[in-house]
């Protein structure tokens, strides 16, 4: 059968559809797609070199260790040089031992931005702790004790029937004897008086400075003062011949209060000294103190018999005592 040619109507329909499609696509001359432009491959830019921090306790940056000589400074100075060399030999740590004139100087350094280590007495310890500048690590031991105690004496006529620390309140408006040059004992006495409600600055008739502890006891015995401070056990075993020969001493002078143990010297670190330095430094101090051939190097400054590690309970009673006194130890540390 012969095929029929497409009709004119069909051809016209095709033309119309193509026209509509062209209009929908914008019509006109097609725009050629531009060829992609080559982009340079990005390359890393070297960062400037950042200098590495010089390690603490290194040759270039030694750690300062601050100490107050417990004896003659002429003996402590060569001991400080020997101690530096000994610590370097045993640990590789580089330290610079500086002899300070006061514990206040050490507290100020501990609370600065510069990392240091320091040996403090008990009063400076609570001041530095109050300021957040001291973590204790070791303490000095002498005669098998890690600190000292004092006791307050009272003329018996002012004490109650049952002698107690409450009798210290009776010293308001009275005279108190203190031994010249015994600042630590007097500060402890001041804390004891404040705990009893007596401000030594404003509430006493007078503070009478005498030559020594024997003179404190004699002053009480003779009525020159009504209160005084001496080392604990002084009347039993420490008094001199003058005091031991006083008649009826026990009935005329009584002990009314004793302080807790007050630390001799404590090694402390501020938070800025890292553990990887604290641990070997504390260990080498212990090692030196326990070595009979080397202990004198440290004893030339600290006068220790030995050292021991601090525990959580080491200073609990003393801290409570300091808090009860109401003294501003942050201000004292300054």
Image: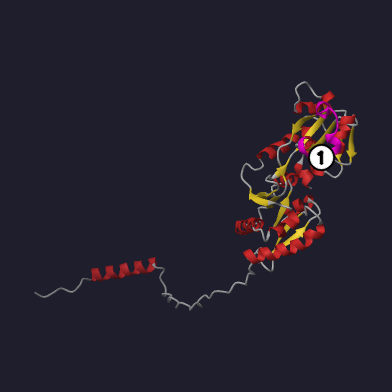
- For this orientation, the residue located farthest to the left is 1
Residue occupied by mark 1:
186
**Image point (71%, 58%), residue name:** 296
The stretch drawn in magenta includes residue 190 = no
Residue 332, image x and y in percent?
A: 79, 44
Residue 196 percent across, percent down from the top left:
77, 30
Q: Residue at x 35, y 66 (%)?
A: 20
Q: On screen, 308 above or below 229?
A: below
165 lies left or right of 46: right
Left or right: residue 176 versus residue 28 is right
As drawn, 256 above or below 314 = above
Image location (x, y in percent) of residue 105: 79, 53
Q: Give the image location of residue 87, x and y in percent.
A: 66, 63
The residue sitting at 61% across, 43% down in the picture is: 312
Which residue does the image show at 77% across and 40% down from the upper left? 328
Observer-nearest of 230 and 132? 230
Q: Which residues are magenta?
A: 236-253
Using the rendered view, name the quadrant where residue 282 is placed.
bottom right
As displayed, is residue 234 above or below residue 273? above
Query: Along the line of sight, which residue is nearer the eye, 161 or 316?
Result: 161
Q: Is residue 178 above or below residue 76?
A: above
SS for dot 1:
helix
């Amino acid at each position: 059968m012969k095929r029929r040619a497409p009709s004119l109507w069909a051809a016209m329909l095709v033309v119309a559809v193509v026209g509509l499609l062209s209009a929908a696509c914008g019509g006109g001359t097609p725009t050629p797609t531009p060829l992609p432009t080559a982009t340079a491959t990005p390359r890393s830019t070297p960062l400037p070199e950042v200098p590495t921090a010089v390690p603490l306790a290194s040759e270039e940056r030694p750690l300062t260790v601050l100490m107050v000589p417990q004896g003659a400074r002429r003996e402590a100075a060569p001991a400080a040089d020997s101690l530096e060399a000994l610590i370097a030999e045993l640990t590789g740590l580089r330290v610079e031992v500086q002899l300070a004139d006061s514990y206040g100087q050490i507290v100020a350094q501990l609370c600065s931005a510069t990392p240091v280590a320091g040996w403090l007495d008990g009063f400076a310890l609570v001041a530095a702790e109050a300021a957040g500048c001291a973590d204790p690590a070791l303490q000095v031991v002498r005669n098998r004790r890690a600190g000292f105690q004092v006791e307050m004496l009272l003329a018996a006529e002012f004490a109650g029937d049952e002698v107690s620390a409450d009798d210290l309140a009776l010293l308001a408006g009275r005279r108190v004897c203190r031994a010249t040059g015994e600042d630590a004992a007097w500060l402890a006495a001041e804390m004891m008086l404040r705990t009893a409600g007596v401000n030594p600055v404003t509430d006493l008739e007078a503070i009478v400075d005498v030559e020594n502890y024997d003179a404190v006891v004699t002053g009480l015995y003779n009525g020159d003062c009504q209160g005084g401070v001496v080392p604990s056990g002084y009347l039993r075993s420490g008094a001199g011949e003058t005091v031991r020969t006083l008649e009826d001493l026990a009935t005329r002078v009584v002990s009314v209060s004793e302080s807790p143990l007050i630390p001799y010297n404590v090694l402390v670190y501020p938070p800025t000294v890292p553990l990887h330095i604290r641990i070997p430094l504390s260990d080498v101090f212990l090692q030196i103190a326990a070595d009979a051939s080397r202990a004198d190097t440290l004893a030339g400054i600290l006068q220790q018999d030995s050292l021991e590690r601090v525990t959580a309970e080491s200073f609990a009673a003393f801290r409570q005592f300091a808090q009860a006194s109401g003294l501003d130890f942050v201000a004292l540390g300054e």
